[in-house]
Structures are given as structure tokens and as C-alpha cells.
Amino acid sequence: MSNEMSNNGMVITESATPLPAGVHLPIYMDNHATTPLDPRILEAMMPYFGPKFGNAASRNHSFGWEAEQAVDKAREQIAKLIGATSKEIIFTSGATESNNLALKGIAEMYRERGNHIITQVTEHKAILDTCKKLEKQGFRVTYLPVQADGLIDIEDLKRAMDDKTILVSIMYANNEIGVIQPIAEIGKLCHEKGVIFHSDAVQAVGKVPVNVIADNIDVLSLSGHKIYGPKGVGALYVRRRNPRVQISEQINGGGHERGMRSGTLNVPGIVGLGAACEICSQEMEAEGEREMELRDYLRAKFEKALDYIHVNGNMEHHLPGNLNMSFVHVEGESLLMGINDIAVSSGSACTSATLEPSYVLKALGLGDDVAHSSIRFGLGRFNTKAEVDYVSDKVIDVVSKLRELSPLYEMVKEGIDLTKIEWAAH
Amino acid sequence: MAYSDKVIDHYNNPRNVGQMDKASDEVGTGLVGAPECGDVMRLQIRVNPETQVIEDAKFKTFGCGSAIASSSLATEWVKGKTVAEALTITNTDIVKELALPPVKIHCSVLAEDAIRAAIGDWKKKNNVAEAATTAAAAH
């Protein structure tokens, strides 16, 4: 028996059996959308919301010096995590701004050299929408396809490059399917051709080793709230040597951040971003192993209990905490409704407000029906094995119930080929 | 997505889930929607050949909670009605009963289509003309 409580139209189903120790509902397992603030980071930030309120640009009193010092420290912490130098870090309001600044700033700066930009179809909307805007301004953009495993084909990239190509922007790790692109290889190719290489590394920084030198990255976007830091703060790495990259500023007013991004610095946010990077530098390796174990355990439980399921994306080149699974013949929204004491995503968080299937999953060649049946599990620093057990048991239970309800599952079990049926369009 | 209590109730306790013998002359089957649209409903009715009363109804639905609720409700409503009466059920009745938001209206349309398709299938099997059901309703 279950006892349902209706709360704002959301139903929380309490099972009669008590929750295992350490499990509190709802469970947050959507760490690609955002991450909870690490209490250590909050603690580091607190003084900068209080007595240490100075403007980092105030050069002639201690309040300003104190703020500047804090910003400098954060710059070092961020640079260290990605193998850069502190002078190469530009603070922004987040990765969307970083991506806009990178693409628009480079396009504007190098327009005389060429008007061609290469990106790929599974980028975040912050890249794709920016590219669309640049197309309207006369730039030519090539959107590389991805293979069935979510990775681009380097040969496609080689073929797409021409003498007008000024910029390649390829994300480090995908926010939906967690695949890690062959970044170092892409960067090497760009450097050989004298093309600037930007990477949106929001999902990768702090999760897997990222090194702008080894990875041949010229410009890189990162964000605070994906690594247990605050929202509203991010950074852009802009290479200063071999090659020196110039970026045309998009916000004017005071020439902060080496002229590339004006505006009074968000000191508490920056301190938080720095602390977040510091913790990742120390804990990333062990944490990555832990998350990967949990992820593999989650996957194994699903595969043991359910048929007609598959993972999306190359699992070899993959973020440790990501598992994107299709539960075929079950509709995604109904699945989420049944597991609404668990926070996960159907498609990406940015598209779940619409009824459109995820464009990333479609790019892999998944049919709309399978795309609709896919769930992204995003494991993070604060998820425990007990939570993974609860989540897997619950998902297995709901998928099984919905399949009892699914005419498609019944037909497939009876050996009917669904592709041979003439479905009535509606 | 906020769901109404009635949608949640049908989702948690769907009525009349199952299947009936498609080959039976007394059974009408409606299969509507398409997997790539995210909704497929199969609604079946068993009709008494003498009285044209729908004595039983079963459904299975692949779709969101609102689609499941719409088809579950449709089976409840058609049961005990004559074929002609069942044809008077419209999607707006379903929208009202389940308090469906605008983005979910298509679920109710699909449920109405499923009722009509099931009745259509039964009529075809039994060579029942439109006029016959209308006449039956008049009695």
C-alpha cells in the first residue's frame, strides 16, 4: 500500500517500508543542470557578502586591496585547475556569457582573416544560438554531425576547414550524454591550420583532467555552479602565448578584465569559483573514481532487471557521473511523473519545458520515441550508494509498471515489428 | 509540469488496463497515435450484439501521465453506454474532467479518437451502418 500526498500537484509516493539510512527525499541526481553549493565554498564566500565588501577596482584603500587580493587568489586557483596562468583568466557572469564573449569576440576580432566558424550539432544552446546570430551577421557556420556514439569524426572536421576558417568551437564534454570529444586531437589540428580553438568545458572542468596546454585549447569556457560553486559566475580562459588570442570586448564600461569584460567584479562569486576549483584540484581524481563506480553500479542494476534498455553515448570517453539511458517503450514524461521524488532530466534541462525530444539524442540517430524514453542521471559529489539503490529500485519499479500499461511493449513482446505498423499521424 | 489530482489518481490507479481478443466479433479495437509523437493509445470495447451496450472496455497507453489518464477515463466513461451514447463523448469533456492544461489537450483528442476508432472497428466487423446506431440510441 502506498500513501500519496498531493503537493502543488506533485505526488510524493511514500512507500510503506522506511527509507534506508542516509536517504532523504527528494533525491537530487541532476548534477549536469546545476550542483548544490558545497558548504566549504559557502564558508569561503561569506566574508565577501559581509565585512569584505570592497570593489576590487578600488586602488587606493584597504577595502579595495582586500577584494583584489581575493580575486587574484581565485584567478590562481582557476588557472591551476586547467593548466593556465592567472593572467589568462577573464571573469564573466557564467558560461553562457563566456561562450558569447568567445564566439562573438573572436568573430569580430578576426573578421578580416576569414568568416568561417566550425562547431557541431550537439553543442549547448549558448553556442548554437550564438552561431545563429553570427550567421545573420554574415558569418558562415558549419555544424559538424556526430557519430552514433556522440563523438565527432576528425575527418569531417578536416574536410570542413578552409582558408576562411577562423574558429573551431567544440565542447569538451556533452551535458546530456556525457561524451568527451577528442579535444587534444581537435586542438592539434586547429593549431596546424592556424585556427583558434574554443571549447565549452563547463561539464568537464573539475570532473576530468583538463589542461589547456596538453589539450591545445586556446579559449575555454567554465562555470561556477556546475562544480559546487555559486551561480552567476564563470570564466573564460584566453591564451596569451603560442598563439596569443585576442578577443573583441562585448561589454564596455571601465576596461576591467584586461579590457575584455567591463563591469565591477562579482567578488563573492569569484571567491566561490576559486574555492570550487581548489577543491576540484584536490579531490577530482578520487571523486571521479567514486562517481564512475556508482554510475556503473546504477547501469548494471538496470541491465539486470530490465530488457529493451540501452545507454546513449560512447561510454569509454565519458564523464564519470553521467548515465543517459533509454527505457524503450516507456514514455519519458510518464516515467518522470512516477519518479518525481528523484530529480533527473528527460533530455536536457533546457529543453524539458518543451515537448520536443532532445536534439542531442536525435543527432545520435535515435528515433523520437526512443528519445522521449530517455533519462539523464547526473551523479555528483553528494550522491551516495544508498541513493543510487533507491533511485535504481524506483526507476525499475516504475518502468515495469508503465510497460504493463504500454501497448508498444506488449506488441514487441508478441513479436510484432513496430516499424511495420502504419501509425495514424495526429 | 503540475498535474491535477484526477490525473495523478488515474496515473497511480489506472482503470481497465489490459487487452481483449481482437479477433472476437464483439470486440472493437482502436489503436491511435504514433510512437514518434510520444503517444500511442489502444482502446478496446466489448459490445453486446443485442443491446449495443458497451459491457467492457480495456486500454493500454504509451504516453505521458495525461495521456494515460485520458484513456483510463475514456474506458470508465464508455462502459455501460450504448455505442451511440459513447460517440457523444468529446475531448472537451475529458479536458474538463481532468483539468488538462492547454499543452495536454492533444491527449484528450487522442482519447476521443481512440473511442471512435474502437467503435468504428466494431461497426466494420458487424456491418453496422451509421443509421443503425442512431436508431438504437433513439430507443
Image: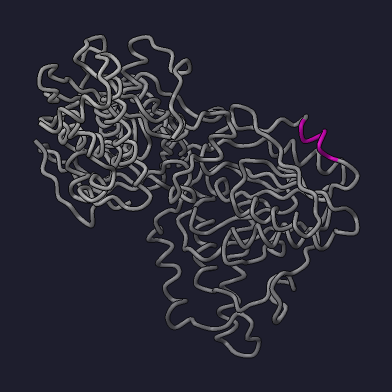
Quarter of the figure with residue B79:
top left
What residue is rendered at 62% in x and 86% in y? A58
Tell me: B43 left or right of A271: left
Q: Position of residue B87 (x, y in %)?
A: 23, 34
Q: Position of residue B73 (x, y in %)?
A: 19, 37
What residue is rendered at 41% in x and 45% in y? A380
Q: Residue furthest bottom?
A: A60
Residue A400 is at least partly visible in this image: no
Quarter of the figure with residue A299:
top left
From the image, which quarter does the C terminus of chain A lie in? Answer: top left
From the image, which quarter does the N terminus of chain A lie in? Answer: top left
Q: Position of residue A263 (x, y in %)?
A: 63, 77
Q: Is residue A315 above or below residue A257?
A: above
Q: Main secondary structure of the magenta part?
A: helix
Is-magenta flag for residue B29? Answer: no
Quarter of the figure with residue A22:
top left
Tell me: A288 left or right of A306: right
Q: Which residues are magenta?
A: A156-161
Q: Is residue A273 above or below residue A145?
A: below
Q: Position of residue A87 (x, y in %)?
A: 71, 65
Q: Is residue A78 above or below residue A333?
A: below
**As rendered, which of A259 and A41 lies closer to the eye?**
A259
What residue is rendered at 47% in x and 27% in y? A311
**As rendered, which of A71 and A389 lies closer to the eye?**
A389
**As rendered, which of B63 and A217 lies closer to the eye?**
B63
The colour scheme applied to this rendered structure is one colour
Residue A210 is at least partly visible in this image: yes
What residue is rendered at 35% in x and 44% in y? A383
